Amino acid sequence: MNQVERMTSARLWAAYHYPYLASALFAIRFIDADNIGGVAADEHFRVYVDHEYTSSWSSQSLGVEMVHQVSHLLRGHAFRAREIGLVEDDVFHWVDAVDAEINDDLIENHAAPVNSALPVDLKLASSLFAEEYFVNGERRAGQHRDCGSAAHGDPRRWEEPPPLNHSDGVRTEEADLIRRRVASEILSHERSHGDSPAGLLRWANGLLNPRVDWRRELGATLRRGVAEISGAVDYSYRRPSRRASCSPDVILPSLRRRVPLVSVVCDTSASMSERLLAEALSEIDGLLVSSGVRLDAVRVFTCDAEPGPAQLVRSASEITLVGGGGTDLTIGIDAAVLSVPRPDLVVVITDGWTPWPAMAPRAVRTLAVLLGEHPPPPPDWVQGVVVEDMTPHGVKVESHSF
């Protein structure tokens, strides 16, 4: 095959095995670049190929290189390098860090590009961010790889000037559109096949679904529910009306503001994250106190496949978590709703993988605090707030609400 046929074959291989990257793969422009020792890319979707160096490479090896280079572009590694103030002495270590972030998401049995770093090479676990590999990872000795400015933002001698028109390369505004289209295709692929790489899925969700601070979202939702319940006033004869002096012969009731009764249903099945559960409980504890709910008005029901007894608690630390089996929160919610006195608000803390009651309980508001990545949505009658742990080491905890 000639050079054009080899690159065409490699791009088709890459698009076949990584279909969610097709928009980016077919946007790249190939440029001959002698003596660069492999393949590199700039920030304008131009891929530079040393054909003599790569003449013995298979379509798969070249295809993996294309996936690798567009991954630098999609994840904004050049921008992120400028954000941390990367200096020339650290360029090769940064390239190792971003390579480790990318190579996590290669399909099993697809070898990583030549001389590129894996997380194990940096003596760190997988599924971390490039910045974590850069700060905490060991430096590799004797192996260096330069993927071009697409990886680190520093233009190399072989790179062409920024494009003046579409035929010269992809300009910034066009690159943003490509990123959003690829992100959409990754999420669509996940819905259809369920096998999108975890790192790319995290990137796509972050790009298309910007998240807000889950504590702020939870606080706003909980306070709104408490305020709506507290705002309902009723008449009481326990205290005399301020207008009683106007009609001494008639006993007038006074208006009173209700103090909401709140029940918390905790999913204690084996799939729950204990750390996130503890964080959510502590946050709810503080929110209820700040919202004016009496400490002795909160009852907690733990539940996996069976509900535990109601626990009247003064703080989250007093809760005894019982369970660890399967999950069916329907009976836990029913137990909370049917308890006496009847609650005004039920807060359900779960990872979402549970049956729900067929319809909303009468005269009871329900709020779901959903823990973990990509929990299934609750029924329409449930207000939901997602508490999403974005990394296995708790580096970043964010969420969005339904």
Image (cartoon, rainbow, N blue to C red):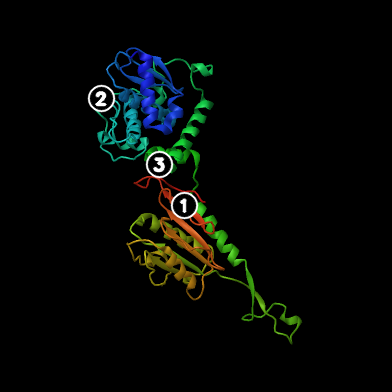
Q: Is residue 279 above or below residue 212?
A: below
Q: Is residue 238 above or below residue 212?
A: below
Q: Is residue 232 above or below residue 32?
A: below
Q: Residue farthest to the bottom? A: 249
Look at label 2 and name its amino acid: Gln
Q: Between disc 1 and disc 2, whose residue precedes?
A: 2
Residue 75, can we see it? no
Disc 1 residue crowd, few under 14, some 14–19, many 20+, Cα 10 Å: many
Q: Which numbered mark, 2 or 3, is in the foreground of this view?
A: 3
Residue 108 screen position, x and y as percent: 29, 36
Look at label 3 and name its amino acid: His
**The image quarter in which residue 158 lies:** top left
Q: Residue at x 48, y 56 (%)?
A: 378
Disc 2 residue crowd, few under 14, some 14–19, many 20+, Cα 10 Å: few
**The image quarter in which residue 6 lies:** top left
- 246 vs 14, left or right, is right
Residue 395 screen position, x and y as percent: 38, 45
Residue 119 screen position, x and y as percent: 29, 36
Asked which secondary structure carries label 2, the reply is loop
Q: Which residue is mark 3?
A: 193
Residue 1 screen position, x and y as percent: 33, 14
In the image, 3 versus 312, the foreground residue is: 3
Q: CA distance from mark 1 to mark 2?
A: 43 Å
Q: Between disc 2 and disc 3, whose residue precedes?
A: 2
Q: Which residue is mark 2?
A: 143
Q: CA distance from mark 1 to mark 3?
A: 23 Å
Residue 397, can we see it? yes
In the image, 26 versus 169, the foreground residue is: 26
Q: Which numbered mark, 1 or 2, is in the foreground of this view?
A: 1
